[in-house]
Amino acid sequence: MRIVFIGTVIFSELMLEKLIELKANVVGVLTKEESIINADFRDLSKSVLVKNIECGYFRNINQLETKAWIERRRPDVIFCFGLSQIIGKEILEIAPMGVVGYHPALLPENRGRHPLIWAIVLGLEQTGSTFFFMDEGADTGDLLSQEVVVISEGMNSQNLYDQITISSINQIEKFLPELQRGTYTKVAQDHTKANSWRKRSKNDGLLDFRMSASKIRQLILALSKPHNGAHLVYNGNDVNVWESKEIKSFRVNDEPGKVLKSDRESIIIKCGENAIELLNHEFRSLPEIGEYL
């Protein structure tokens, strides 16, 4: 089974290395030389350099040169794991088996953008790891393999990324032989159960202390590194916050946003419900007790 592999992020690299470890017949790899939209961008050419697998670069996956590059390698299947572009019909139809994509959610639920971040922000108890056959929609194709991934208490985006990666590697070990033998199955998505998450904006990471402390903590966890961090505005400057803890022991008649404690060790701020302790932050100068944020 001849495979063309497409990817541009660290997850892509890990999946490609797993395929190489399993001695899959990867006949070509397509990647990017640079990206300004992916915090976890990875140029896959370094992964295939010593494996004698030909690597090509693209800007737009649907450009004619890219299509011709794929066609020359006569793939039976295309794997696309980690690409922020919609693949067009002409490329979807090149390989007889189609294009296998990946989405870290329990499709048909939670299609769309930033699935790990939104899962943590919304306080979901579980998400998923899903491989599916791409069609012209966004995350709408038939399912190939799916596993549930539990989101444990205090898990940040990097922790969830790591757990998702473990699940996806296990899935590849199971479905790759099925694809090679032609014994795989497709399961149509129930589109009546689908929803789609939007692209987040900077304002989605702004801490509003009228929110509950638990919601603020989830937002900080979701936007922790390698993302840009949740933030608040103090003295006209954005202040990133990387780590926090919910505090349930405080005076109940303090208003949201009031600074209850402020020193080099931590800052405690009253929230709409309970209080939040900021443990890792980027304040240039500390707010004073009694100030409002």
Image (cartoon, grey):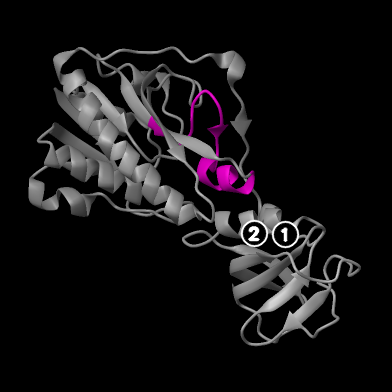
Q: Give the range drawn in magenta.
A: 102-122
**Quadrant where the C terminus lies?**
bottom right
Name the quadrant containing residue 176.
Answer: top left
Label 1 element class: helix
Q: In this view, does 155 lie above or below 126?
A: below
Dot 2 corresponds to which residue? 217
At which x and y percent is residue 17?
A: 20, 45
The answer to whether residue 168 of the structure is visible from this angle is yes
At which x and y percent is residue 250?
A: 79, 71
Q: Which residue lies furthest to the front in this view?
A: 249
What amino acid does circle 2 point to?
Answer: Arg
The answer to whether residue 235 of the structure is visible from this angle is no
Dot 1 corresponds to which residue? 213
214 or 146, which lies in front?
214
Label 2 element class: helix
Q: Residues within 10 Å of mark 2 (few under 14, many from 20)?
A: many
220 or 65, which lies in front?
220
Is 103 magenta? The answer is yes
- Tell whether label 1 touches label 2 (CB within 8 Å): yes
Name the quadrant containing residue 55.
Answer: top left
Q: Residues within 10 Å of mark 1 (few under 14, many from 20)?
A: many
Task: Look at 34% across and 46% down and name the residue there.
Answer: 11
At which x and y percent is residue 196?
A: 60, 30
Task: Look at 27% across and 47% down and name the residue there.
Answer: 13
Name the quadrant containing residue 76.
Answer: top left
274 or 222, which lies in front?
274
Residue 199 is left or right of residue 292, and the answer is: left
Q: Residue furthest right?
A: 253
At which x and y percent is residue 272?
A: 82, 58
